[in-house]
Image: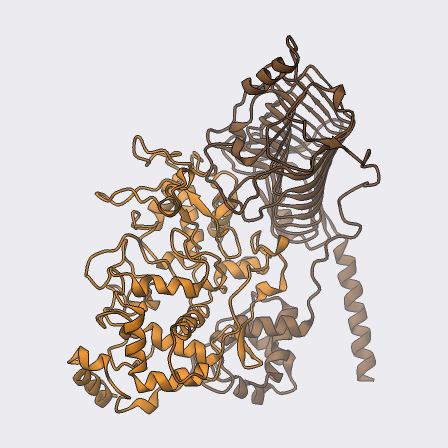
Amino acid sequence: MMGISTGTLLLVALLAVHAVMAGELVVKAGESIQDAVSAAKSGDTILIEPGTYKETVYIDKNNISLRGVVVSGNWPTLEGEKIRNDAVLYSGSGITIENLKIVNYKGNGIMGQAGNNFVIRNNWIIDAGVYGIFPEFGKNGLIEHNVLSGIEDAAIYVGMCDNVDVLHNEVFDSVAGIEIENTRHSIVDGNYVHDNTGGILAFITPGLPIKTNYDVIIRNNFVVNNNHENFAIPGSIVSYVAKGTGITIMAADDVVVENNIITNNEYIGIGIAGLEFIAGVRSDPESEPNPDRVKILNNLMWGNGENALPEVKAAVQAMMPGERYVDIADISKGTGSCILEKDRYVSVGLDRYSTCKMTSTADTLTYTLPEPVEIREIAADEKGKAAYYGICAGCHAYSVKMIGPPTMAIQAMYQGRPEALAAYIAAPSKVREDYPEMPPQNYISEDVRLAVAQFMLQVEK
Amino acid sequence: MIRRAVCLVVLCALAAFCLQAAEPVSGQRFTLSTHCPPGFELARGSCFLRSLYQLYDSLRGAGVGGLKTGLAEVRDGFTPQQIDLGRYLFFDPLLSGDGSLSCASCHHPDLGFSDGRGRSIGVTGDPVDRSAPSLWNVAFLKRLFWDGRAHSLEEQVTGPLYAPDEMGNTERRLLTDLNANETYRRLFEEAFGQNVITANAVYTALTAFEASLISLNSRYDRYAHGYHEALSADEIAGLNVFRSFVARCAECHTPPLFTNQEMAVIGTPEPEGLPFDKGEGALTGDPTQRGAFRVPTLRNVANTAPYMHSGRFADLRDAVKFYTQGRGHAVAEGERLSLHWHIWEPDLSERELDLLVSFLHTLTDETFRPPMPDAVPSGLEPVGVVPSGAR
């Protein structure tokens, strides 16, 4: 009888939770997006109506969508006025950010710190500071159909991530168009990358805590006229990018360049270098410096390299006197690289390249994951144990008096009543004369409070 | 109590006697704990760290990321006895050449396991070259010392023990003194099952104790775990400045440990009158590593002033202000440094600097502070020279 009614209650509770999870919150002009984020629960979508929003939005929750509502060409606009740092910061997983116009920030347009399963699409980002879109430490993400310009470092910067697709974006008038840095399994496909200092870059920055960059597919992109003056901040990594660079591969491994149109980039169409190429950065013995196993498949290239590196230029002249252009230069010590139909291009430093055995990456549709990265399901006893030793043990030892009474004494008092103990943990009151009053532990979520109460009542030493 | 204190004073009137002391009158009172320190679970006889952060993952297990990000690999698995023996050793001035300094003389629990000085003072009475880093959360670090030259805590402890200007001891003398002490022989036997005290056992015990100094329960952590009321509006604003790409603090002082464990050249000035410290570059000779130092954790940073490798900045406000004064502003003319790319000109407002400082105060947590022993097996006064500011 008891069991049935508890079960029914649980079911009702679960349904209620489910109903709440699909919520939508509407933000109108004059209201605050952040207020809606603060009120939102996991699973909610925040609809942002047209208007100008002068704020930094931070999302420290999971499964939240920010969705702009564009009406008759009027976009909801996050306006930084060159006084605010970042438009959107998120640390949660399952974050979607779409249909926003972001202008005039000092730091980043959209920055993620460790959120997995992110989707950033259909945003219009202009002069938003250092990076337009910058997910960092995230796994499984999609960046598509964004338009970015006027960014003083990289318009789209995938830094220290795994499994990210960057598809169908337009990036222009920025220092770097699309950067894939210290990241594994990424695809840059179908983007229009023009009029930047450098178009697409896959590279390793030394001195970062995640050291590798491999399995990058750069395909079906237009990489044209990337001849913008370099206006990067002095000392930044991209301040070393030469004006007129189409695609740069520095120290990254297993990069495939396929079916791109790469034209009129005046320094080089595709440049391949090792870490020795950048000066002014502390050398990091833990970063492997060579770009290995680069694969250059069929690409359409012309009109590149008119102002190439003098050594490259000289090498071209030695081989082909009078040649104005150079499409590809490899000045690295990388090994295992290959190319298809090398003779189609003017190239330097590719003597050691073999003919690629593969001809297409068509079998690889995406590097995003078939299923989202799970927000780890934690068993109750594991949660309870972590909270007991990680927090409670600061004041409670098993059998001796510390700051609070021994766990044994608490067990005697609450045996069989974990719910009561969980309630006390959230809102303690003074019980014992000879002990200080316990501070409330209401910052621990309800399920963890119950789990820790259960654990505490059965721990044996 | 009083009787014991008097007894110790009498015994220690002659330091030489103390160094050679046999089992003191009350030797039997030294027993080793059979419980793990707070934060650790006793499993199969050893202590293993437990923290809510272990419920989270981190990209490639690197222990860097955002709020709900897992920790870097930890050194744990020491026995309760090894940890407790390490605690006695840590506070025992017998470990220094002249019996005046213990580890705690420069890493004092009252001072965030540092010493409140810009540069620590060794047995010679003169300041050494650099400041004493905090020991909170060293269990997670893959390189130690400001110049990153040690790759394990065991390797690290030999530095201060045997540096002539720090603790000024020698391995031979340390082992002679310890083996001459019946209490220590008994305790090492209990912790390591060896009737002769070896150098490795000493290093392991010190490592075991240092690796037990865990600080992961600050108000910031409550926020990170999802209780957003734990921080005030200003502190959250400070967090947002901290992780913004304008200030960029979190790019190197990355959560959850508030260090990415890398080496960085940031170009801080030395205190007035001191020569330029080449840091990692002095070890390697690599010109790009001149002035590179290990990125320190910011946990409990509010308790470890002054700041930077030689204590140039007296308080947190001065320390954060350094980052907004311009790339290389304090680098001497003619000095060529490969400054880190995140050192730029963020142009932070005075208000933002204040917000950053208020956020840094939310990283304080010393709930797992270990008890200081009332007495140590040598019979010397625990700690030895006490840094000013310690209670």
Looking at the colours in the rendered structure, which chain would you say is drawn in orange?
B
* Numbered disc total: 0
**Which residue shows up at 82% across the image and 34% down it?**
A360
**Which residue shows up at 51% across the image and 30% down it?**
A82
**Residue B10 as seen in the image, left or right of residue B278:** left
The quarter of the rendered structure image containing the C terminus of chain A is bottom right
Viewer-closest of A143 and B285: B285
**Residue A213 as seen in the image, left or right of residue B125:** right
In the figure, B229 relative to A310: above or below?
below
Question: How far from the left and from the top, in percent, is residue B275?
Answer: 25, 43
Question: How far from the left and from the top, in percent, is residue A431?
Answer: 48, 83
In the figure, A371 relative to A276: above or below?
below
Viewer-closest of A101 and A34: A101
Question: How far from the left and from the top, in percent, is residue B368?
Answer: 44, 71
Q: Which residue lies furthest to the top in this view?
A: A322
Q: Quadrant of residue A452?
A: bottom right
Question: How far from the left and from the top, in percent, is residue B148?
Answer: 42, 53
In the figure, A241 relative to B302: above or below?
above
Looking at the colours in the rendered structure, which chain would you say is drawn in brown?
A
**Residue A126 as seen in the image, left or right of residue A63:** left
Viewer-closest of B106 and B320: B106
Q: In which quarter of the image is residue A189?
A: top right
In the figure, A285 relative to B380: above or below?
above
